[in-house]
Amino acid sequence: MSGDSLLTSKQGGSLSIYSQPKNVTKEFNGRDSPKNSKFHHYRFELEHDVKRLKNQLQKETAMRALLLKASDQSHKIELSHASSLPRSVQELLTNIAAMEATVSKLEQEIMSLHFLLIQERNERKLAEYNLTHSLSPPNALDLVRLSEKNESLRPKDHKAQPRSKVAKSLQSFDNANELSKEMIRCMRNIFVSLGETSAGSKSSQETASVSSRENPPSSSTSWWSPSEHSRISRWAQSPRIDIQKNSDVLATESDVFDLYTVQGKLSWADIGSYRSATEVASMSVEEKRLGYASDELWRFRNLVERLARVNPVELSHNEKLAFWINIYNAMIMHAYLAYGVPKTDLKLFSLMQKAAYTVGGHSYNAATIEYMTLKMSPPLHRPQIALLLSILKLKVTDEQRQAGISTPEPLVSFALSCGMHSSPAVRIYSAENVGEELEEAQKDYIQASVGVSPRGKLIVPQMLHCFAKKSVDDCKVALWISRHLPPRQAAFVEQCIHRRQRWGFLGSSSSKCGIVPFDSRFRYLFLP
């Protein structure tokens, strides 16, 4: 091998040796590059999926919020302009509303047919009575129809009394407000005469307490919110209220008189004006009671006929307020006698549309009086009626609209009674003092219906809680209610709130209330 070739060979070898790391590095990078690319691609796909899932979660959350609003009547105005709802959901809500309207119409038709059936049955019983001259008392639901068509049911001493004498006693009620007040007195006399519970009786209280012990409330009526269950161990260690030490505020076990009693509620020692209320929780028809009630019903019908001569448009705001409150309460009681007590809110609303009086040449039913004439808001504590009001549009003429009050009065909520266990008591309202009387009605209802739990939580009826939430936030409802209680009870409630805060119920939950669901059992309370 020549020197040149050897040199070339050496140089080539040297070059190959020095170039080998480059080739190795290049070869190594060539092997690693696909892995990095694959890793970056996989990471990119994961990030893309996470982003897509986040967007989908946001859309689902927004959809859930809109559907929750759709089920809440207080957001119906927002929903009417909610363009973010999918078309399929909008169509579904529209179909649900149409179905609810159809169901309501069918309910109304069923009630009408039921009434016709009762009327035919009453006519048959009346015909049998006329044939046999039976002295057996009629069914309670047949009382009005029989007394309208058969005067032979009236006792002889009453029959001998000339009607001109009764009509003469009605001549002093040409004033619209005096007429409405007399209608309340008359209907109250009928219910009290047919009722089995007298004023100040504790029999119903004892029955209610026994019933609550035998049938403890379900979890839906628990006073504790879900957030407070997590603090149950600390709550179990908190001291109970000593009734004996607070006997000036709380009623002892031997002296409890609570018209709104529920299990787990400590009652006030003083429930205010409701202690003198007359309670009618059931009615029965006996021959003596029937005779008196038949007389009062004939008198009541004469008062109703006089309503046609009243022109409510000419009344002042206070006169309209007192007049329509009295008329509404009398109309509901009259409807219960004529049609029977409804078992559901749907049947009650149907009954409110059928029960009507002619006032000043126009027909007013109970639903029109409550929601158009008195301008009441849909009852949030009775969602079925609120739903019907959102579907069915009540219509009135311009003159009927002028016959109503000019501005809404929220305190009317404590004056209207639908004859149910959670309803406020019936009282007579006068045009001269209707403002003060409504404030007194609110104060009396709050004092009679609220109480505290053995651990110091304020217990309030659902109707009152919904009313208070229109004025204050949920966490301030307890303090708002305490300001409408007598001084001793108010101080006791505030003390309980602070005590619950010290024992671990921190934040707004310490001032939240236990809510008693609306009780639709039949019951009337009459204040003197």
Image (tube, helix red, strand yellow):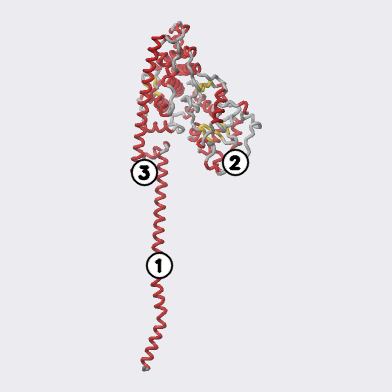
Q: Nearer the viewer, mark 3 or mark 1?
A: 1
Q: Residue at x 36, y 17 (%)?
A: 120
Instruction: Quickly name the residue at label 1.
Output: 35
Residue in front for this viewpoint, 113 or 61: 113
Q: Nearer the viewer, mark 3 or mark 2?
A: 2
Decide which of tag 3 and tag 1 comes sooner along the chain: 1
Q: Which mark is residue 510?
A: none
Q: Residue at x 57, y 36 (%)?
A: 457
Question: Gap in Å between the C-alphas at discs 3 and 1?
Answer: 45 Å
Residue 85 disc label: 3
Instruction: Give residue 297's position: percent from left, percent from top.
Output: 44, 14
What residue is drawn where x is 53% and y is 40%? 225
Q: Is residue 498 left or right of residue 354?
A: right
Circle 3: residue type: Leu
| Residue closest to the eye, 380 or 145 | 145
Residue with the most extreme front position: 132
Do we see residue 433 in this rendering? Answer: no
Quick one: SS at disc 1? helix
Q: Is residue 22 above or below residue 205?
A: below
Q: Quadrant of the N terminus?
A: bottom left
Tell me which label, 2 or 1, sits earlier in the chain: 1
As drawn, the label of residue 235 is: 2
Residue type highlighted by circle 2: Trp
